[in-house]
Image (tube, rainbow, N blue to C red):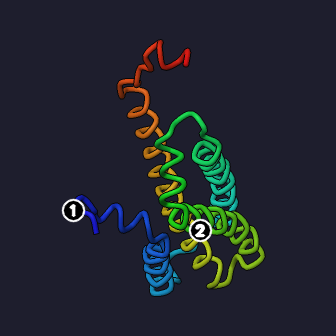
C-alpha cells in the first residue's frame, strides 16, 4: 500500500461502502415508521425519481469524460492502471442510480403502507451517496486535466523532428 493512501482512496475503491448510510436510513425509518409519512409523500417519491434521473445524466457525462478522454496521457494511465476500480465504481453508480429512479415510482403503488417510506429513505440516501461518488470522480477528472494543462510540455528539438 502506498504511503499516501488515504481513507478517501479506500472509499473510492470500494463502492459497496455506499450501502451503509442507506441501510442506516432504512433502519431509522423502520423504527419511526408512524412518524415519517407526510401527507404529500407521493410528491416526495416523484421528486426523488426525478433527481435520480438528473444524477444519472451527470454520471453519464462524468463517465464519458473519463473514458473518452484522449487528450491526456494521465487519464490514459488512470484508465489502464485502475480499470477494475473504475469499472466497479461506474457499474455501481449506474445500476444503483437507475434503481433509485425506478424504486420510488414503484413505491407510489405502496403509498399508505409502511413499505413506501422505507423505499423513499433508501432511494434518497443511496442517491445522495452515488451523487457524491460522481462528484468525487468529476473532481478527479478535472484535477487530472488541470495537472496535464499546467505541467510543462516536453519540447522536441528540431533536429529530432526532421530525422
Disc 1 element: loop
Quarter of the figure that contains the N terminus: bottom left
Horizontal relation, residue 81 to residue 51: left or right: left
Quarter of the figure that contains the C terminus: top right
Q: Residue at x 48, y 63 (%)?
A: 129
The x, y position of residue 56, in whole percent, is 66, 54
Q: Quadrant of residue 42?
A: bottom right
Mark 2: few/some/many CA within 10 Å (<14, 14-19, 20+)? some
Farthest front residue? 163
Total marks in image: 2
Looking at the image, is mark 1 or mark 2 earlier in the sequence? 1
Mark 1: few/some/many CA within 10 Å (<14, 14-19, 20+)? few
The x, y position of residue 71, in whole percent, is 57, 33
Q: Which residue is mark 2?
A: 92
Q: Residue at x 50, y 85 (%)?
A: 30
> Who is closer to the viewer here, 32 or 67?
67
The x, y position of residue 59, in whole percent, is 61, 51
How much space separates mark 1 and mark 2, taking CA atoms? 27 Å
> Who is closer to the viewer here, 149 or 38?
149
Say if 142 sits above or below 52 in the image. above
Q: Nearer the viewer, mark 1 or mark 2?
A: 1
Horizontal relation, residue 61 to residue 79: left or right: right
Say if 106 sits above or below 48 in the image. below
Farthest top residue? 158
Q: Residue at x 43, y 79 (%)?
A: 24
Q: Residue at x 57, y 73 (%)?
A: 37
> Who is closer to the viewer here, 95 or 52?
95
Tag shown at residue 25: none
Tag shown at residue 3: 1
Q: Quadrant of residue 90?
A: bottom right
Disc 2 element: helix
> Who is closer to the viewer here, 52 or 141?
141
Amino acid at each position: 500500500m502506498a504511503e499516501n493512501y488515504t481513507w478517501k482512496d479506500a472509499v473510492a475503491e470500494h463502492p459497496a461502502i455506499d450501502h451503509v448510510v442507506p441501510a442506516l436510513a432504512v433502519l431509522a425509518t423502520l423504527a419511526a415508521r408512524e412518524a415519517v409519512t407526510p401527507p404529500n409523500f407521493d410528491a416526495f417519491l416523484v421528486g426523488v425519481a426525478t433527481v435520480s434521473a438528473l444524477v444519472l445524466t451527470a454520471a453519464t457525462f462524468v463517465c464519458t469524460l473519463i473514458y473518452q478522454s484522449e487528450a491526456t496521457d494521465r487519464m490514459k494511465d488512470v484508465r489502464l492502471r485502475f480499470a477494475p476500480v473504475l469499472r466497479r465504481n461506474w457499474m455501481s453508480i449506474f445500476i444503483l442510480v437507475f434503481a433509485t429512479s425506478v424504486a420510488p415510482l414503484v413505491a407510489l403503488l405502496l403509498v399508505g403502507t409502511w413499505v413506501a417510506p422505507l423505499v423513499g429513505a433508501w432511494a434518497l440516501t443511496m442517491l445522495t451517496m452515488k451523487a457524491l461518488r460522481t462528484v468525487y470522480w468529476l473532481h478527479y477528472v478535472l484535477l487530472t486535466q488541470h495537472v496535464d494543462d499546467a505541467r510543462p510540455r516536453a519540447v522536441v528539438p528540431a533536429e529530432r523532428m526532421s530525422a
